[in-house]
Image (spheres, grey):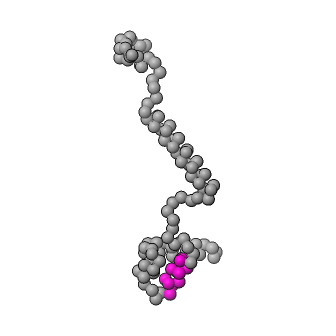
Amino acid sequence: MLRRVNRRPATGLRTSSAYAHSRSPPSSGSLAEVERDLIRERTNAGLAAARARGRLGGRPRKLADPKQLALAQQLYAAGQTDIATICQTLGISRATLYRALNSNHTNGAKSSN
């Protein structure tokens, strides 16, 4: 289908294909960029639709229950139970316990002002 063309274009360069004189097809990089933009738009539209239905993304929190959080605070504040026992009782890690205690302490300080 394609023939070799040995004409001299206005620039003085010799061309070896018919594509050189025609409009060149889009590069694969620009196609990938357009495709990526479409994926991003669809993903954001799907997330917005899920939020509208009341669905939130992400991993569920371990101490989302206010009763469990209150128990953890009570046991920690009493000082009679060691950290490992509190964590084992609630089924959480030390980091989760400290994160919950610190975030609640920070939130409590903000709301009291």
Magenta stretch secondary structure, dominant: helix
Q: Is residue 33 magenta?
A: no
Q: Is residue 24 visible?
A: yes
- Point out the residue furthest to the front here: 53
Q: Is residue 81 above or below residue 66?
A: below
Residue under the point 47% across and 34% down: 31
Residue under the point 63% across and 55% down: 52
Q: Is residue 98 visible?
A: no
State the quadrant of the C terminus. Answer: bottom right
Q: Is residue 7 above or below residue 68?
A: above
x and y percent of residue 33 in the render? 47, 38
x and y percent of residue 109 in the render? 59, 75
- Point out the residue furthest to the top here: 7
49 with respect to 94 (left or right): right
Nearest the viewer among 111 and 70 is 70
Residue 91: quarter of image: bottom left
- What stretch of residues is rendered in magenta? 68-78
x and y percent of residue 96 in the render? 46, 72
Residue under the point 46% across and 18% down: 22
State the quadrant of the N terminus. Answer: top left
